[in-house]
Image: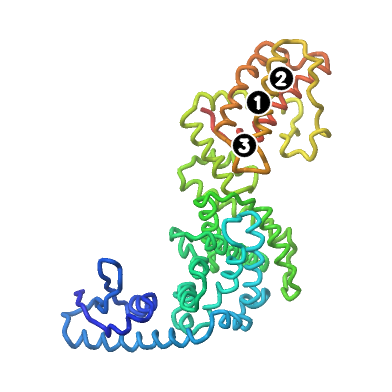
Amino acid sequence: PQLTVATFDPTFLKAPKEVLISEMVEHQKYFPMADKSGDLLPKFVIACNNTPSDQIRHGNQKALASRLADGRYLYEEDLKTPLEKWGEKLKTVTFQKELGSIAQKVERITANVELLHTHLPICDLEQAKRAALLCKADLTTGLVGEFPELQGSAGRIYALKQGEDPEIAQAIDEHWMPRGEKAPLPRSPIGVLLSIADKIDNLLSCFAIELIPTSSSDPYALRRQALGLIRMVIEGHHFLPLPTLLSAAYDRFIQNPSLHLKLNKETVLEPLFPFFTSRLRTVFHESGFEKDEIEAVLSRGLQDIYDSYRLVDAIHTFRNESRDKLSDILEFYTRTKKILLSQDPTLKPSWQRQTRASDHTTVNPDLFTDENEKYLFQKLEEVKKTFHESILDRRAPQKRDYPKAFALLAELKDPVSALFNNVMILDKNPEIKTNRLTLLQEVWDLAEELLDFSKLQGE
């Protein structure tokens, strides 16, 4: 193939460059040309299978001129109608038969924006709701009807031309992001919030009518959307309790009596949580974390996405920088768990038990008969206090200091070892035996508050 440069009427440059580029690239397979500053030039490159000639250039210029004229006409005609009016036409556009129109979808997205804002107050709520109202409006325009690849971009352009706030206009475009697995993410706070709100609706909608991806099929790109949501949350350092959010979003989702859903809430959410967890494994693996580190965190179920990332990152760093201390933790964790399960194979750590008091008694210091028991108990109380007051604050995940938590846990190595090496845990006196096992269970419970250390390979 050979290349040649052709031109088009410079007056076409008055139309948005996105329209011109789409015409040249998507429809005519030409290469647009720009100057050093990125501004489009009235020139384009043609790839020819034979020697370029004036006749070839003229023919291609004529074909492109016709296409550009059509694009400019659609653009100018669309601008005569306010974007909000275009949005009203979404009432006649079906999203899915069981899920109503795209106008109803926009209502759900707006509700999701309000819900999300309670967890991520990263932008002005009213602006975010305005962006939600307009985010799908361009789907009914003539330009997007002819050039579907301009969805979002057309909405941004029209919003700016019609006097909408630039941040709202940007969010209209960005809510479609990322447009590919490794494509750019939204940059504006409103764009992030709106993109997450839309993806939550897409995922809930498809799972609610059993359009769940299989190993060979994902026609609605749900894997990509879940990955995009995860990337936005992690790269934006946003704490988001996903199970709570999905549950609340579904409660709002089913409030519309016009929806025809066969499945109940539990049936919809049950496969959605492992679907997200699987995508998290992918993201964590691509971030360089080891498989056992990932499983030590995710095996306990889906929680806050970014907080889970921070925890995996913390154990990964701790392993690389303090390998000996991690070995110490694994040693006393394994030893403690082994003796506890030998006495009660059904025993579970505190986070899996319904109520603490119904499963085991508390430690009674009056039953201590050895200084090593007192030593461990005092150290454990000291460590627990720091854990529960500042490190593992469940109400404020951004305050959790996981590196410090691992360092604190390692401090239990010596007192636990001293107890095992100098004290008969399974004493003949049932009260003393139970008290010592309860003390060790406190150690096990504390470790399990961080992660499942049994998933980590020995050091």
Who's the residue at 72% across and 73% down the image?
A: 259
- Amino acid, disc 1: Val
Q: Which residue is mark 3?
A: 451
- Name which of mark 1 and mark 3 comes first in the sequence: 1
Q: CA distance from mark 1 to mark 3?
A: 16 Å
The percent coordinates of residue 337 (x first, y second) are 67, 27
Labels 3 & 2 near each other (Cβ < 8 A): no
- How packed is label 2: few (under 14 Cα within 10 Å), some, or many (20 or more)? many
Which residue lies under the disc numbered 2? 377
Q: Is residue 419 above or below residue 95?
A: above
Closest to the observer: 134 or 6?
134
Numbered label attached to residue 9: none
Compute the Cα span from label 3 to label 2.
22 Å
Specify the quadrant that holds the N terminus.
bottom left
Q: Secondary structure at mark 1?
A: helix
Depth check, mark 1 against mark 3: the one in front is 1
Q: In terms of secondary structure, where does tag 2 sit?
A: helix
Q: Is residue 284 left or right of residue 118?
A: left
Give the mark toward the camera: 3 or 2.
2
Which numbered disc, 1 or 2, marks the residue that appears first in the sequence?
2
Q: Amino acid at mark 3?
A: Leu
Picture layout, residue 167 above or below residue 97: above
In the visual, does 62 lie left or right of 15?
left
Q: Which mark is residue 383?
A: 1
Question: Left or right of 53: which side holds 26?
Answer: right
Asked if residue 148 is positioned above or below residue 343 in the image, the reply reads below
Please state which of residues 254 and 7 is positioned toward the viewer in this rendering: 7
